[in-house]
Amino acid sequence: AVFGFDSEEEAVRLANDSEYGLAAGVWSQDIDRIMRVSRRLESGQVFVNNWAGMDQTVPFGGVKQSGNGRDKSHHSLEEYSELKTVWLSLTPAP
């Protein structure tokens, strides 16, 4: 879903206001904001300036009602951890 927001705080609140948490997306050129918001988002992975990252060596899974544990990679053995993947593209979208 796409929502309008007036502040970073409101954007994070809207994104986290769900019982699900598989993935989130952040679009920005401000690396400090990207890292700050990514840490606060309650999701198993965060896509930054893209929406297509997948790799068998990177853990995949969600938080809240979006999954239990992680698939793929050696992290699938760490089912009791809350991991987060942040996909970051430093080049502007075409």
Image: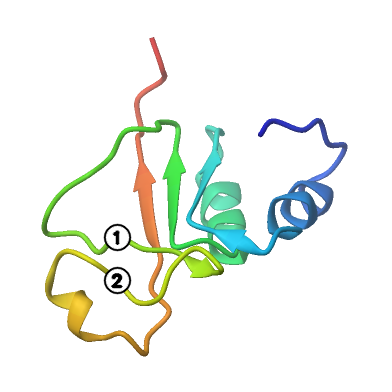
Residue 41 visible:
no
In the image, residue 77 above or below residue 66: below
In the picture, the quarter occupied by the N terminus is top right
Number of numbered discs visible in the structure rendering: 2
- The residue that disc 2 covers is 70
Residue 5 visible:
yes
Q: Nearer the viewer, residue 61 or 87?
A: 61
Q: Quadrant of residue 86?
A: bottom left
Report the side of 75 relative to 49 (left or right): left
Report the side of 69 relative to 1 (left or right): left
Q: Please, what is the three-letter code of the amino acid marked with disc 2?
A: Arg
Query: Distance between the Cα atoms at labels 1 and 2?
Result: 5 Å
The crowd level at tag 1 (other Cα within 10 Å; few <14, some 14-19, many 20+) is: many
Q: Position of residue 71 (x, y in %)?
A: 23, 66
Q: Nearer the viewer, residue 91 or 11?
A: 11
Residue drawn at x 59%, y 65% as measured from the top left: 42
Residue drawn at x 55%, y 51% as measured from the top left: 32
Q: Position of residue 64 (x, y in %)?
A: 57, 71
Q: Quadrant of residue 67?
A: bottom left
Describe the element under mark 2 as helix, strand or loop.
Answer: loop
Q: Please, what is the three-letter code of the amino acid marked with disc 1?
A: Phe
In the picture, the quarter occupied by the C terminus is top left
Q: In which quarter of the image is residue 13?
A: bottom right
Q: Mark 1 and mark 2 in contact? Answer it, CB < 8 Å.
A: yes
The crowd level at tag 2 (other Cα within 10 Å; few <14, some 14-19, many 20+) is: many
- The residue that disc 1 covers is 60
Residue lying at the far top in this picture: please name it: 94
In the image, residue 36 above or below residue 70: above
Q: Where is residue 85 in the image (x, y as percent from the top left)?
A: 36, 59
- If you read the primary sequence from the N terminus, does the residue marked by circle 1 or circle 2 appear first? 1
Report the side of 25 relative to 61 (left or right): right
Q: Position of residue 72 (x, y in %)?
A: 17, 64
